[in-house]
Amino acid sequence: MGQRFDTMPRKNQLFLWVCISIATATTVYLLTKSNNGGMLPELCRSAYEQQHGNPPGNHGSIIVAGQLISDRDILSYEPWPEKQSRENFPGMLPPVVHYVWCGDKKFRFHDYLSVLSAVKLIEPLKLIFHYTHLPQTDSYNTWFQELKASIAGLELRQLSPAPACGSKDLLQAVMGALSTDGGVLIGSNVLLARFPNQFTGQTSSLFAFAPNSADKTQGIAFTKSGFDEATKNSYLETIEKIAPSKNQNDNNCVTVEAYNARPDDAVCVIFNDVIINPRDIIEAQTPFAELARWLFYGSRAPALPKQDFENPIPRISHFIRLKGSKKPEDRGMYNEEFSFNHMVNILSALYVAGFERVFLHLEGEEPRGRWWEEVKKERNVTVMKAVRPSSVFQTKVDVVQHVSDVLRYLTVYKYGGAYQDFDVTWATRLSDSLLAYPAVAGMEWEQKDKEWPESFNLGVILARPRAKWLRHYIETHKDFRDNDWGFNSLRMSYKTYELYPHQLLLDRKLQVICCSGTCHPAWEKPDYRRSGINDKRPTMSFSWQEVRAVHVTCPKPHPSLASPNAVKNGKDMFAEIGRNVLIKSGRQHLIS
């Protein structure tokens, strides 16, 4: 038995503490040098992430009222002294915010920003959400649920009887609530842009409203303390008289465009028929985007991923095929003859994209046929038995494509590298610069739900081992929907990007998806999205040399990639890509 610490001589205790300190410091140093901090204890992780430039306030996901929402710490953010309240002691302003919500409608991202502006600029102890109808939610617009899960002092208070939206009666009703204790009123479609410098310890009230607006609640009101009926009527008269002044930012709420022109003066911003989503603020170089980023992400800088050339995405690629599909286009990987097109796509990973190893995760017996024998000649192709998931977060997964989805995310999270569908042909080499990002994904062209600004297609994805973005995305499968084809794979992957854009590079040229004879370049302006294969609007032309990969989703294979003769004689870009693969892989004899 060793000696107890408290019975040791003092010098022995000191010596032991020094040894423990040295050992602890060495351990922490070694752990912080690990890839992505993957082995870090939780106590060290936050400091590590701060050091590596990740914005504050981002965590995981939780289920609230049957909906998956982001569990975000909205109270962690960089200081912005020019915007925030200078209140250093109680008494200057009652710490209560009254927010006005009127109408039976959806609570969208710009509404969420409005409430966040009150939370971060006022830091209220209580936020009273005055409503006529509780906000609607859908699979994309979960912002109100996130609000309820994030603000401890949120109080929902129904206006009854409900005044008409935008009416003077509605303004009077909320001003009546304000009269009890004072505080701050934030009206409909209004964002607080800064704490007003005019409101000091000697000021009893301050008002900034949209001049000549039909919506009488479109503005903000600051009152130092409760007030009587006569004072309330006086305040209402003051608000009613607010009109455009020579300085359009003086005691007025301004549009987004006006704020961008003079951001230092405006007290508040109004949203009139404006739809704003996270994608609009991630990297935009405007004053409003900077303010919105600070409100949403907690950081003013563009929310972009950083390159790390010392810790690149490994040059390995994973293919997955599972038993269960009976589709004719999936022939060749279910114990049947291996197709020519599958061989071309595997060779494209090695000889065009520049992957050093290819891993085929296959279920069942090994494929057979001439083209499979050709693949087996490659020393850098390894066949592995696929580990088939049966559930994700204890929810059963039956649809074979969804089973494959889950396996690909877990595989790339563990090993890193690329995942590619068997219908993806690499067109150009992946640069070291691209692989220096923590993760890379591209877009889906088909728009199934118009509420979603965009969606991802993870038929191609690149990531480091234990990539943080991929970890967050996997967590979204806590709300797994086996009966909804694109919810988890297409839409929630995009939502994860909106929440964590600093952890993934959105590369619109990572893949071009082609279906039914039409290719969909995701950088087309004004909009590359289409409603489906029956949407026959033409798409922009492009050169295959400017993209990383071509992803043919229907029909499979593309006729020009179906056989050596098709590749040899074809006149389109698919035949050109096929010839490029065969030549670079030393198999030009197949088309000579």
Image: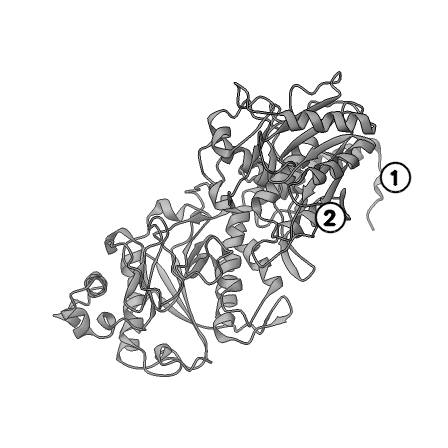
Picture disc at residue 474: none
Q: Using the image, tell me which numbered label, if any, was put on residue 7.
A: 1
Query: Is residue 48 at least partly visible in the picture?
Result: no
The scheme the figure's colours follow is one colour
Q: Which one is nearer the viewer's eye here, 97 or 29?
A: 97
Q: Is residue 402 above or below residue 432?
A: below
| Towards the viewer: 420 or 158 | 158
Closer to the camera in the image, 104 or 327: 104
In this view, the residue farthest toward the top is: 202
Element type at mark 1: helix
> Residue 195: x percent and y percent?
65, 26
Kind of residue sitting beneath label 1: Thr
Give coordinates of residue 317: x percent, y percent: 39, 61
Q: Position of residue 252 (x, y in %)?
A: 58, 26
Q: Quadrant of the C terminus?
A: bottom left
Image-based side of 158 in relation to 333, left or right: right
Q: Is residue 135 above or below residue 446?
A: above
Nearer the observer, disc 1 or disc 2? Answer: 2
Q: Earlier in the sequence, mark 1 or mark 2?
A: 1
Q: Residue at x 20, y 66 (%)?
A: 575
Instruction: Specify the amino acid type for callout 2.
Output: Ala
Q: Is residue 471 left or right of residue 518?
A: right
Looking at the image, is 193 positioned above or below residue 466? Answer: above
The crowd level at tag 2 (other Cα within 10 Å; few <14, some 14-19, many 20+) is: some
- Disc 1 to disc 2, C-alpha distance: 73 Å
Which disc, if any, is residue 162? 2
Q: Secondary structure at mark 2?
A: loop
Crowding around mark 1 (Cα neighbors within 10 Å: few <14, some 14 to 19, many 20+) is few
> In the picture provided, is 249 more to the left or to the right than 381?
right
